[in-house]
Every structure is written in structure tokens, then in C-alpha cells.
Image (cartoon, grey):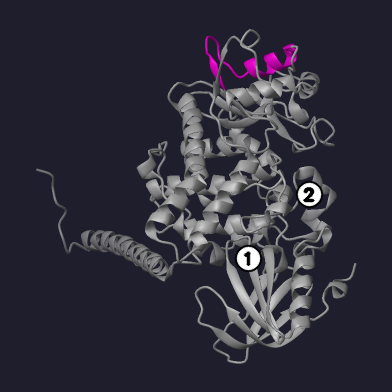
């Protein structure tokens, strides 16, 4: 395929742009390239607008007269812009090109494979969070776990990484048997180790017990290997009990208490992926309607059920954190496949428990370890967003990662001094998960990323973000390291709509931006003053020492 075949009209003059946050902009020039829609103006004061085709969620055309029409572009980051084009044929051609270029089936045609770093790469992001390096941190606290390469060729579990951490007492032959007992081969692996209590969080997929109650003693041995003598554990199932029972009839199921007597099973239901995408669509539709009245706005916000989903996630994550921190009990988390709500709950529980996960570096490691390496299917889930047509959405499309970031933001806004990063950092991660010039979020799992040879053919997002001049804009000026567990409130009045994300194209965010800039300046001045005070104190001590040596002053004797 050649991009030129999809671009019938590469350039149009005299277009008119309607864009949120900008005045009406006439006399523009529209250009279409293989990966970008570019809008420019004759006046030097107007910045060019570059839009990645992969950021487009839907394109709507409206022919207004024989002289032309308008094209409304709705993006995956909830931005909407309308372009008035002169000429019906040109309008049709541009619409067709954007629809084709925003839905390329072959991933190798996407922009990350054509983008080259325009900056010096100080750190290779593809190697920044290797499994061995993360395991080395664990080895400083315990010797009861080991790293296994049983899945080095991805034959045991296609969606797992090549290396995972498991109990040292369980050998690879046992793991291979357990993999046949778990949906998709996702046998229980370590997600988090609590160094104070020795408890852990493990994640996996549902057991394949089926309607006949199939048993796997190797699975029981693996799960029990995480328990200390005399300890009990919890199995947190993210499905409602009736769905777990239905799964049993279809060959799946849950751990039977008779075979797992040391474990208590708890069902903390989080809605399925297809329900979440419908909820997001209703929320974004409400947020985009600026003409609606207060009562109707509040009604539509409530009927979207988005904040209810956020509450369910926080409830489940807090339960896991409470079991680990307060009771010192190990937890096994799973739903059906173990690639969506399982990862969501396991990672959010770590944000609550582990102060390192509330730092920039620690949160990046969390996303890499618990989402990218753990096999969350980003290519499927993030292919469509809130503006996509209902008939184009499938059960594979779901805002699971967005729900995680929103849940993190809820904790952040309750503990604004405990996070090293700000909300722009979370929004940046969301945008790159849906569309990016970097290869980090391409593919559904490590196996696919290796097949695409992403580490050699694309640039890592972490290589860009972790440059000091870039990272500075994502730092929280209020941050003060907090080694404690943060316990978020899940009361309805404690949860808020993430206006910085959902309303940023509707409500002017300049006041917030100004406040953030002022806080950064104050913190920088405070840092400079503290440095100066330290330097002056050292000079004072040095002068006092010299004065004592020369006899200019006498030492003060203690009474």
C-alpha cells in the first residue's frame, strides 16, 4: 500500500477552522500527509495545528451547499474540531482520506515506525524497566521468590512476558501444569510484595474447573506457597457471583473452597469492558454538550455511571490493600481472562500501598510491569474511544486503562502532596496509549512487540518523557515524600469528575495552568533560598573557625 493512494486531495486552501479554545480562524490551508492532518495560516502569529491520523475517532461530513461543506473530526482525547471546506468534491475526498488513514489495519504503517528521535537519547526506555532489574529490588527484601523464564518463547502463555516472578518452592514443571488449568495459560504470578508483613498480591486468570469441578493439585500448591504458616489468604474475584457461576458452566469458574480451605473468596464486581465503553460514551457526550442546563447535566452525569465504576474500582483496590497492610494476608486477584480488571485492581492497590509507585519513575515502572508486560491488550482496547460509532465498536474496545488513570487521579486529588507527578502526567500517558509517535503502547503483549521488533524500529516513550527538560512539566510542585499508605475515601461526595481531562476542551483551563506555573516558580525560589541559606551557614561556620584560630573571638564555654 502507498499512502498516496489514499490521499486524493493532499492540499486545500481557504479553509475555516472551528476549534475549542481558539477564535474562528479563516484563510487556512489544509494538508494531508501519510500520518498527519496539518492546518496552517498565513499570519505568523497563528501556530500550525498537527493532528495524528491515529488520534481520530470519527469523521463526520456535512455538505452545506453546492459550494462545499464541513468536516467534523472527533478525537480519542475528546477534542472536536470542525473544518469548513470549499468544494463538494474536496470535502468528500478529505473525509474519505481521513477515514482510511485513521483506520489502517497494518500496524507497521503507523507513525511510530516512521518517527525518528529529534533529541539525544540519554536512556533507552526499552531497557529502563527490565524484569531482572525489578526483581533485584524484590531480592533485597526476601529470598522466597524467583524469576522464571519458563515462558521465554511465549509457548506457555502467549499474553505473559518472557520472565515472571513466582514462589521459589514451585518448580517450572509445576508451573507448566498450572498454566493448563488457568484461562489462557495465565498462572498465578507475583504482582506486589509487602516487605513489612511478608504478604503478597498475585494475579492470574480464572481456573478452568468447568461444570464438573475439575481439580488441579499443582495449582493449589502454587497458590498455597504464598501463605506463611497458620495464615489465611483472600481470593478477590472482580466478577459478580452470578457471572462467575455462568463461567463455570462454560468451562471456567472459581476456586472451590473444598480444595482451597485456607483461602476466602470475595466477589467485588467491576463491570465488564463493553459496559465501560458505553458508560464513557454517555459521559463524554454529556461533557460535550455546552448548551445543557444544570439539572439535565447532573442527570446525564449520573446516568452515565462513570463515577460509579470509579467507586467500584477504588473499593476493590482498597479491599486488597487492607488485606495486605492491615491483616498481613496474601491476596490472589482474577476475573475472567486476567488482562483487564485484574490488572486494574492490582496496580491501583500498589498506588495505595507503595510510596514508590507515587513517584514518576515508580509509576512508569508500574505501567510497564502491570500493564504492558502483563499483557493488557492496548491495541484492541484503545482502538476506539468515546466518539466512535456504535456499529464500529466491539467487545474488544474498552477504556480500562482510562478507568485506572481516573482512579489514580481520584487518589491524587485527595492526597495532592503525596504524588511526585501531576495530572498532566496522567493525561499524557492516556493520550500516548491511544495515539503516539512512540512505540511503547503498540501491540497487545510482549510477544507481539517482540515480533514487531519495536525496540529496534521505534523510539520508547520513556526515552522522551524522562529527559529533564520534558519531565519538569509533569512534576507536582506540592510533592512531599510520604512513606505511609494512603487510604482514599470512596464516599460519593469524595469522588469528582476529572474536569482536567473530560472538560479541558470545554472549560478554559488557563487559570489552573497559571496557578500551577506560579506554584512551580514559588517552589523554585524556595529551593534557591534554601540553597543560599545552606551556603551562608557553611560560610558562617568557616568564619567562626577562622576567628577562633586567630583569637578574634573566644569560645563559648558551657555553663
Q: Nearer the viewer, residue 296 or 148?
A: 296
**Does 245 sit left or right of 310 as displayed?**
right
Which of the two discs, 2 and 1, labels the residue nearer the N terminus? 1
Q: Nearer the viewer, residue 199 or 283?
A: 283
Q: Which circle, 2 or 1, is nearer the viewer?
A: 1
Q: Which of the image's four quarters has the N terminus? A: bottom right
Task: List x then y, in percent, for residue 516.
Answer: 40, 65
Residue 456 in view of the camera: yes
Dot 1: within a 10 Å radius of its alpha carbon, few (fewer than 14), some, or many (20 or more) residues? Answer: many
Task: List x then y, in percent, for residue 295.
Answer: 38, 55
Residue 8 position by quadrant: bottom right
Provide the residue designation for mark 1: 74
Find the magenta span and give its range.
213-235
Outermost residue to the right: 1
Identified at 49% across, 63% down, the residue is 289
Q: Please, is residue 528 above or below residue 87 in the view?
A: above
Q: Does 236 lie within the magenta span?
A: no
Residue 419 in view of the camera: no
Provide the residue designation for mark 2: 449
Q: CA distance from mark 2 to mark 1?
A: 29 Å
Task: List x then y, in percent, for residue 51.
Answer: 66, 71
Identified at 53% across, 83% down, the residue is 24
Residue 512: image tag: none
Q: Nearer the viewer, residue 339 or 101?
A: 101
Residue 217 position by quadrant: top right
Q: Which of the image's four quarters has the C terminus? A: top left
- Secondary structure found at label 2: helix
- Secondary structure found at label 1: strand
Amino acid at each position: 500500500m502507498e499512502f498516496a493512494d489514499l490521499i486524493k486531495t493532499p492540499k486545500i486552501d481557504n479553509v475555516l477552522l472551528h476549534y475549542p479554545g481558539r477564535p474562528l480562524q479563516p484563510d487556512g490551508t489544509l494538508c494531508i500527509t501519510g500520518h498527519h492532518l496539518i492546518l496552517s495560516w498565513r499570519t505568523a502569529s497563528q501556530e500550525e495545528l498537527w493532528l495524528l491520523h491515529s488520534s481520530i475517532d470519527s469523521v463526520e461530513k456535512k455538505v452545506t451547499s453546492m459550494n462545499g461543506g464541513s468536516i467534523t473530526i472527533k478525537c480519542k482525547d475528546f477534542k472536536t474540531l470542525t473544518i469548513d471546506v470549499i468544494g463538494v468534491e474536496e470535502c468528500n475526498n478529505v473525509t474519505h482520506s481521513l477515514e482510511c488513514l485513521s483506520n489502517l489495519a497494518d500496524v507497521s504503517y503507523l507513525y511510530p515506525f516512521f518517527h525518528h528521535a529529534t533529541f539525544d537519547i540519554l536512556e533507552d526506555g526499552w531497557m529502563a524497566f527490565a524484569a531482572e532489574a525489578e526483581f533485584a529490588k524484590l531480592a533485597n527484601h526476601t529470598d522466597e521468590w524467583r524469576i522464571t523464564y519458563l515462558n521465554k518463547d511465549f509457548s506457555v502463555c502467549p499474553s505473559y512476558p518472557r520472565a515472571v516472578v513466582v514462589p521459589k518452592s514451585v518448580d517450572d514443571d509445576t508451573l507448566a501444569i498450572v498454566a493448563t488449568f488457568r484461562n489462557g495459560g495465565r498462572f498465578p504470578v507475583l504482582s506486589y510484595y509487602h516487605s513489612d508483613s511478608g504478604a503478597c498480591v498475585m494475579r492470574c486468570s480464572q481456573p478452568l474447573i468447568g461444570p464438573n469441578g475439575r481439580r488441579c493439585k499443582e495449582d493449589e500448591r502454587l497458590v498455597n506457597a504464598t501463605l506463611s504458616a497458620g495464615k489465611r489468604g483472600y481470593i478477590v474475584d472482580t466478577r459478580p457471583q452470578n457471572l462467575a457461576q455462568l463461567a463455570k458452566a462454560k468451562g471456567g469458574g472459581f476456586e472451590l473452597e473444598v480444595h482451597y480451605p485456607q483461602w476466602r473468596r470475595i466477589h467485588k464486581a467491576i463491570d465488564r469492558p463493553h459496559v465501560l465503553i458505553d458508560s464513557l460514551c454517555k459521559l463524554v457526550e454529556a461533557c460535550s454538550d455546552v448548551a445543557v442546563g444544570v439539572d439535565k447535566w447532573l442527570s446525564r452525569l449520573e446516568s452515565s455511571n462513570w463515577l460509579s465504576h470509579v467507586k467500584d474500582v477504588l473499593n476493590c483496590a482498597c479491599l486488597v490493600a487492607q488485606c495486605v497492610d492491615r491483616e498481613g494476608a496474601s491476596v490472589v486477584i482474577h476475573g475472567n481472562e486476567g488482562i483487564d480488571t485484574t490488572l486494574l485492581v492490582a496496580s491501583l492497590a500498589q498506588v495505595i500501598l507503595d510510596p514508590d509507585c507515587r513517584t514518576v519513575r515508580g509509576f512508569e515502572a508500574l505501567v510497564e510491569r502491570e500493564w504492558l508486560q502483563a499483557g493488557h491488550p492496548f491495541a484492541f482496547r484503545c482502538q476506539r474511544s468515546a466518539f466512535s460509532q456504535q456499529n464500529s465498536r466491539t467487545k474488544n474496545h474498552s477504556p480500562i486503562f482510562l478507568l485506572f488513570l481516573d482512579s489514580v487521579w481520584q487518589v491524587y486529588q485527595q492526597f495532592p502532596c503525596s504524588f511526585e507527578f501531576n495530572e498532566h502526567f496522567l493525561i499524557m500517558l492516556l493520550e500516548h496509549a491511544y495515539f503516539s509517535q512512540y512505540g511503547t503502547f503498540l501491540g497487545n503483549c510482549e510477544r507481539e512487540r517482540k515480533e514487531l521488533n519495536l525496540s529496534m524500529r521505534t523510539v520508547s516513550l520513556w526515552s522522551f518523557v524522562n529527559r529533564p527538560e520534558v519531565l519538569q512539566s509533569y512534576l507536582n510542585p506540592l510533592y512531599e515524600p510520604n512513606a505511609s499508605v494512603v487510604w482514599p475515601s470512596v464516599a460519593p461526595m469524595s469522588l469528582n469528575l476529572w474536569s482536567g481531562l473530560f472538560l479541558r476542551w470545554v472549560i478554559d483551563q488557563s487559570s489552573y495552568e497559571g496557578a500551577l506555573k506560579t506554584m512551580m516558580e514559588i517552589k523554585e525560589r524556595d529551593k534557591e533560598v534554601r540553597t543560599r541559606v545552606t551556603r551562608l551557614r557553611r560560610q558562617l561556620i568557616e568564619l567562626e573557625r577562622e576567628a577562633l584560630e586567630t583569637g578574634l573571638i573566644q569560645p563559648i564555654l558551657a555553663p
